[in-house]
Image: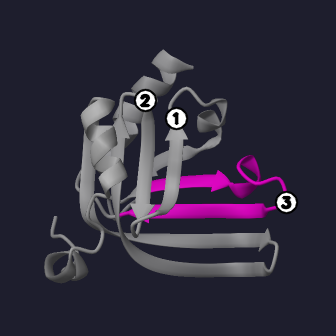
């Protein structure tokens, strides 16, 4: 699968220093960088924000180690940063859609008491099926 043009030209969506450290220290299982991602908000409410439905696009990187799953947009903005032994991981839904994208869907109230709604992340990675498979195995082992 081709990388984003922004990645090819400017390195946007490249693994961050923190993600590289995780790969080295936590035994990397899978990763991909420079991939397109859509973020869709459904009935989203947070202080100062309210969306019935809104979609944003970005270029990101995603890393699965033996201990955690991270997806990062920019140098410090984590879309996902959850340890695999976190009980909330069971509440995240992982799947592959018809376009063969990795889909991660969850209720934002899991992570923020004063937020509500659903967020769907769709990562265009050639490893989508591998991510879902590995996460399901690890969820069973660690939880």
Q: Assess disc 3: are there few (<14), some (14-19) or many (≥20) residues with their C-alpha within 10 Å of its C-alpha.
A: few
Q: Is residue 119 magenta?
A: yes
Instruction: Identify residue for label 3.
Output: 114
Give the quadrant of the C terminus.
top right
Instruction: Identify residue for label 2.
Output: 67
Please, which colouring scheme is shown? Answer: one colour
Between discs 3 and 2, the one toward the N terminus: 2
Horizontal side of 65 relative to 45 (left or right) equals: left
- Which x, y percent locates residue 95? 45, 48
Q: Nearer the viewer, residue 105 or 19?
A: 19
Between discs 1 and 2, the one toward the N terminus: 2
- Which x, y percent locates residue 139? 50, 26
Q: CA distance from mark 1 to mark 2?
A: 6 Å
Q: Nearer the viewer, residue 142 or 72?
A: 72
- Which x, y percent locates residue 41? 64, 71
Q: Nearer the viewer, residue 109 or 104?
A: 109
Q: Residue at x 52, y 35 (%)?
A: 83
């Amino acid at each position: 699968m081709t990388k984003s043009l922004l990645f090819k030209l400017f390195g946007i969506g490249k693994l961050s220093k923190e993600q590289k450290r995780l790969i080295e220290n936590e035994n990397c299982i899978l990763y991909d960088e420079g991939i397109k991602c859509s973020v869709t908000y459904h009935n989203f409410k947070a202080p100062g924000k309210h969306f019935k439905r809104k979609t944003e696009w970005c270029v990101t990187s995603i890393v699965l180690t033996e201990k955690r799953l991270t997806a990062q947009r920019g140098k410090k903005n984590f879309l996902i940063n959850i340890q695999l032994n976190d009980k909330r991981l069971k509440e995240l839904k992982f799947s592959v859609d018809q376009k063969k994208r990795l889909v991660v869907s969850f209720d934002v109230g899991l992570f923020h008491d004063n937020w509500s709604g659903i967020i769907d992340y769709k990562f265009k990675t050639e490893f989508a099926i591998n991510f879902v498979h590995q996460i399901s195995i690890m969820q069973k082992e660690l939880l």
